[in-house]
């Protein structure tokens, strides 16, 4: 940048001149605020939660006793109720993820490779529109649908799953579907049509093309979507309260420990279970190589 | 080297973004723990200080009632209102016309005193205790299983009854009870009392039940249609039933259970779980559950039966079964950290005054604590129906109270504590 001696340097010019030779300052200005937020607000609160898992609660008054104890962790990680519920929750989360993937793959393929631009836009709008409606509205809509005297029961002659784990899985699958469709759609978009043509030119059947060309290329996208559906299902406690009947998931147990039982330390210890599950899931995905191209 | 590091960064980046997104759904579970320590800190430090004053060596162990509650200053005068009032109340206790236009005693209070009332509905006693510990509320309508925890936790202040004119005519058998006072010092103003009822939908349950057995060992008749109260205190309902049906267990008081007695109650509830459609803690959930046909029989409050019959979608009936019932005796208490103490004192006087107490009692379906309320009810037989003046009847209800190792009925020190009930309750739900 050249500045003539007669005109004064504009402020913006001076600022960029000042920053020009200082890459570290530039980086600090750029990332300072988001990093501060991430470390203090997010990791800080996680750390506070983990520390409180080692405290206990006075039996009678319900006040937190700040004395180190591993009793909560032993309760949570001992073979028994908590682990059993954790296994059930992971099962639901896995089922939701698989169902979402099964629905999203053909839908996203159609949107990306078959549909005309007009239909494609319509489908994208259709997939995204439910995100504009409140979570609670959608969950209650399913409660109404699945009610003993509800529309589903009327249509099927009473053969509905009723409230329970099945209803929870169905509701969660519906709720998180857009989070799976959008990444998978983007994944298909990045697969050049030429590759599919080349595959068929080389004599591959459509099935072979899907198995050997298409699926390996969109796998990272499915993995990305699955992280959303899996972790969102793992933490859910509202849908299961609304359509889950009497069943408990980790979310409801943590909520119960925290709100009903007023036992924040035990809730913190229990909250380590979904945290561990998602960390293990991420490491498992990393081993498959799905995270490397994202 | 460079490449692998970049890959790692990418993986970590994706992971953290995803984790952040994942927390969206569980925001209340993941954010409240971080808020909690600061709020509970304050509460526990006051209790801790008082604890050392009372029983110097047992700061870490449970402060037994013998140690005396922490000293919290008591008001000596009521000044002008502060313009605001934040109370935690049972559903139906502080109606402002939003549920039923004809049911409104909050607005008249606001015009009288200039205190704008913000009501937070508490669904269970545990929730009320947890909310009070935040220190953000001026008062609470606490049941007997919350009162002592609040008093000994230093969360509520003693009440200067001389500043509450309505107090003088409260039924005598509700004053200076072990759940609302310590050594002759009242910690609140009695509000009302009543029994938990057995409610059913006569369209689906054709023979009217007379025993709690209909929701316990004979519940399989309504498999998948039974509802129960989602709180550990509900174990007492099972114990009350066992007290009447299995004398061999030797249960005297449903809140003073030995290990063996608790196990028997838990067994009964595990059997009941097979017939449960869903548990309710939120009273609107039970209303919805009955109206949608999800549940047809279960424990309820009279106000729930009244609400359902008022809506008219289904009809329900309710009784106090032959075994008797658990119940509540509620007390309006003032927070130790009340930001609007004058408004709270005015509220305690207002809500227990004859006319208003009669209105609340009739709407909620309970016996009013105010003796003069009986002449103000629209149904002149109301107080007779609810045995409001009948101290002998009142003594038969097993009022909610917090189970402790030192048996609450004074029978010994081998009872099970509430924390154990909590664990058992989660086990029952499975």
Image (cartoon, coloured by chain):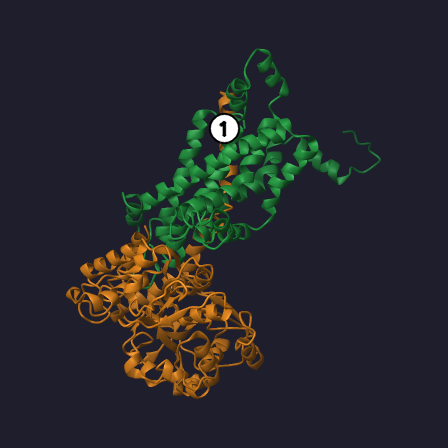
Chain colours: A green, B orange
Subunit under mark 1 = A
Residue B39 versus residue A18: which sits nearer the camera?
B39
Query: Going by the image, does B202 lie left or right of B173?
Result: right
Q: Say which residue appears at 60% left-offset and 40% top-offset.
A: A127
Instruction: Relative to A233, say whether B28 is above or below.
Output: below
Q: Rate crowding at label 1 as few (under 14), some (14 to 19) or many (20 or more) other CA atoms within 10 Å.
A: many
Instruction: Tell me the quarter of the picture where residue B290 sits.
Output: bottom left
Residue B421 shows up from this direction: yes
Outermost residue, top side: A202
Instruction: Relative to A286, say whether B143 is above or below.
Output: below
Instruction: Relative to B250, say whether A201 is above or below.
Output: above
Q: What residue is disc 1 on?
A: A291
Give the x, y percent position of residue A234. 43, 43
Residue B143 versus residue B133: which sits nearer the camera?
B143
Give the x, y percent position of residue B292. 47, 59
Residue A143 versus residue A272: which sits nearer the camera?
A143
């Amino acid at each position: 940048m050249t500045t003539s001696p007669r005109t004064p340097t504009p402020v913006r010019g001076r600022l960029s001149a000042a920053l020009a030779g200082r890459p570290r300052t530039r980086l600090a200005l750029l990332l300072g605020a988001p990093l501060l937020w991430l470390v203090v607000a997010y990791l800080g609160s996680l750390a506070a939660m983990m520390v409180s898992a080692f405290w206990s609660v006075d039996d009678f008054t319900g006040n937190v006793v700040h004395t180190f104890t591993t009793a909560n962790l032993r309760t949570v990680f001992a073979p028994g109720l908590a682990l059993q519920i954790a296994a059930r929750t992971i099962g639901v989360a896995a089922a939701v993820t698989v169902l979402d993937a099964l629905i999203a793959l053909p839908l996203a393929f159609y949107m990306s490779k078959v549909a005309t631009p007009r239909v494609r836009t319509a489908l994208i709008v259709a997939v995204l529109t439910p995100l504009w409606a409140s979570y609670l509205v959608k969950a209650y809509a399913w409660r109404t649908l699945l009610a003993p005297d509800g529309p589903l029961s009327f249509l099927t002659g009473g053969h509905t799953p009723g409230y329970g784990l099945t209803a929870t899985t169905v509701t969660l699958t519906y709720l998180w579907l857009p989070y799976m469709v959008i990444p998978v759609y983007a994944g298909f978009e990045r697969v050049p049509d030429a590759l599919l043509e080349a595959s068929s030119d080389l004599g591959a059947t459509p099935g072979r093309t899907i198995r050997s060309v298409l699926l390996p290329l969109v796998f990272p996208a499915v993995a990305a979507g699955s992280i959303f559906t899996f972790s969102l299902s793992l933490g859910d406690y509202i849908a299961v309260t609304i359509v889950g009947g009497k069943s408990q998931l980790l979310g409801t147990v943590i909520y119960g420990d925290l709100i009903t039982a007023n036992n924040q330390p035990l809730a913190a210890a229990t909250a380590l279970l979904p945290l561990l599950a998602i960390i293990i899931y991420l490491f498992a995905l990393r081993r498959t190589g799905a995270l490397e191209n994202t | 080297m460079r490449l692998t590091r970049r890959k790692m960064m990418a993986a970590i980046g994706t992971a953290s973004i995803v984790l952040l997104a994942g927390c969206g759904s569980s925001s209340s579970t993941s954010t409240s723990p971080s808020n909690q320590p600061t709020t509970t800190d304050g509460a526990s430090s006051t209790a801790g200080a008082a604890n050392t004053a009372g029983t110097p060596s047992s700061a870490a162990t449970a402060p037994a009632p013998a140690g005396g509650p922490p000293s919290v200053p008591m008001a000596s005068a009521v000044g002008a209102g502060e313009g605001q009032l934040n109370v935690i109340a049972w559903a139906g206790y502080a109606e402002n016309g939003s549920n039923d236009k004809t049911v409104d005693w909050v607005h008249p209070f606001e015009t009288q005193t200039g205190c704008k009332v913000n009501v937070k509905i508490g669904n269970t006693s545990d929730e009320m205790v947890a909310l009070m510990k935040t220190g953000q509320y001026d008062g609470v309508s606490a049941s007997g299983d919350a009162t002592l925890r609040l008093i000994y936790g230093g969360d509520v202040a003693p009440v200067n009854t001389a500043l509450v004119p309505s107090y003088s005519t409260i039924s005598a058998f509700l004053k200076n009870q072990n759940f609302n006072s310590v050594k002759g010092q009242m910690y609140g103003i009695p509000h009302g009392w009543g029994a938990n009822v057995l409610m059913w939908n006569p369209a689906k349950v054709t023979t009217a039940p007379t025993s709690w057995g209909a929701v316990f060992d004979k519940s399989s008749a309504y498999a998948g249609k039974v509802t129960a109260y989602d709180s550990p205190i509900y174990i007492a309902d099972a114990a009350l039933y066992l007290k009447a049906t299995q004398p061999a267990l030797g249960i005297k008081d449903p809140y003073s259970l030995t290990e063996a007695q608790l196990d028997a109650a838990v067994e009964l509830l595990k059997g009941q779980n097979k017939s449960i459609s869903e548990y309710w803690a939120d009273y609107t959930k039970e209303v919805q559950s009955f109206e949608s046909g999800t549940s047809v029989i279960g424990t309820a409050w009279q106000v729930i039966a009244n609400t359902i019959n008022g809506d008219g979608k289904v009809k329900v009936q309710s009784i106090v079964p032959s075994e008797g019932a658990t119940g509540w005796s509620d007390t309006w208490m003032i927070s130790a950290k009340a930001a609007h103490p004058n408004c709270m004192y005015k509220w305690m006087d207002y809500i227990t005054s004859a006319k208003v107490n009669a209105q609340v009692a009739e709407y909620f379906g309970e016996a009013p604590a105010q003796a003069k309320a009986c002449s103000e009810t629209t149904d002149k037989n109301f107080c007779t129906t609810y045995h409001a003046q009948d101290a002998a009847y009142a003594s038969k209800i097993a009022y909610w109270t917090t189970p402790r190792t030192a048996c609450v009925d004074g029978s010994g020190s081998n009872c099970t504590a509430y924390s154990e009930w909590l664990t058992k309750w989660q086990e029952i739900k499975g």
